[in-house]
Each structure stands twice: as C-alpha cells, then as structure tokens.
Image (spheres, rainbow, N blue to C red):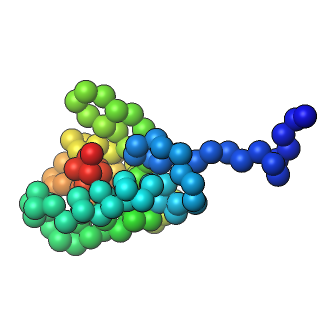
Amino acid sequence: MRATKDTAQKETRCLKCKRILRNASPDGLGPKCRAKVRRAGKAPELALYKPAQVEKATENLRQGGLIPLRKSDKNRVYLIVGSDGTTTYRTARAACTCPAGLKAVSVCWHRIAAHVFDLAS
C-alpha cells in the first residue's frame, strides 16, 4: 500500500541538534535548544554590542529567522532573514552579506544573531 499525502507525515527536525520534533515549532528548534538559545541571548559576551542590536538579533532568533547552512571547523554559515522579512543574507560570526556587513564599519545584528546561536552550542 502506498502512502498518500494525508497519511504520510514529513518528519520535522530541530535546526540545531537535528532531533525529530514531536510537536510543531514556530522557530524550528526543539525545547532544549530553544532554552539554550534563550540563555545564550543573555550571555555576558554580548555586552560588547549595542543593546538595541542584541534585542533585534534575539527577536529574530525567537521568530526562527536564522537557518544553519554549513558548518566547518572554522566557521558556521547561516541564512538569516533581514528586517523587512523578505531579504535574506548569508552570515557568520566573522562576516555578513548585508549592506552594513559589506561596509564592515561596525558589527551588524545579523552577525550578533550568529554569535548568539554559536554560544548556545
């Protein structure tokens, strides 16, 4: 017997630890990973950044706007949704493809979101 659309359920996995999620998740994270990210958003290392940028980054994480793309030994690369909700940028702790990140005058909030996500590891 072949599975139909109604009977076959696509298993959803946590974006961070890749465990199977039993319940739907608005941000793509399981409960344990969500708690780790929430704790990392209050880490003392984030005092280096402007509070408004940290708030914007953590809000984006709460809404599920950061998707891991690639993990290497040196850097993790993420896809992040911009402020307008339609543009996406590739970001890491070291660099970002947003206009502010390309100018490299200061750290953009996309990079801060990547930092928070990395701290939760």
Left or right of 68 on screen, residue 43: left
* Residue 22 image position (x, y, % from top left): 57, 54
Give whichever of 9, 111 is nearer the camera. Answer: 9
| Quarter of the view holding residue 83 | bottom left
Could you say where residue 47 lies in the image, as x and y percent from the top left? 10, 64
Quarter-wise, where is residue 108 in the image? bottom left
In the image, what residue occupies the spot 30% across and 28% down?
72
Q: Is residue 84 visible?
A: yes
Say above or below: 37 vs 89. below
Does the image show residue 65? no
Residue 9: image x %, image y %?
A: 71, 47
Q: Is residue 64 left or right of residue 43?
A: right
Residue 23 location, quadrant: bottom right
| Residue 77 to residue 43: above or below | above
Which residue is at a point 25% across and 27% down the rendered structure image?
A: 73
* Of the pair 90 and 62, the residue shown nearer to us: 62
Residue under the point 19% across and 66% down:
42
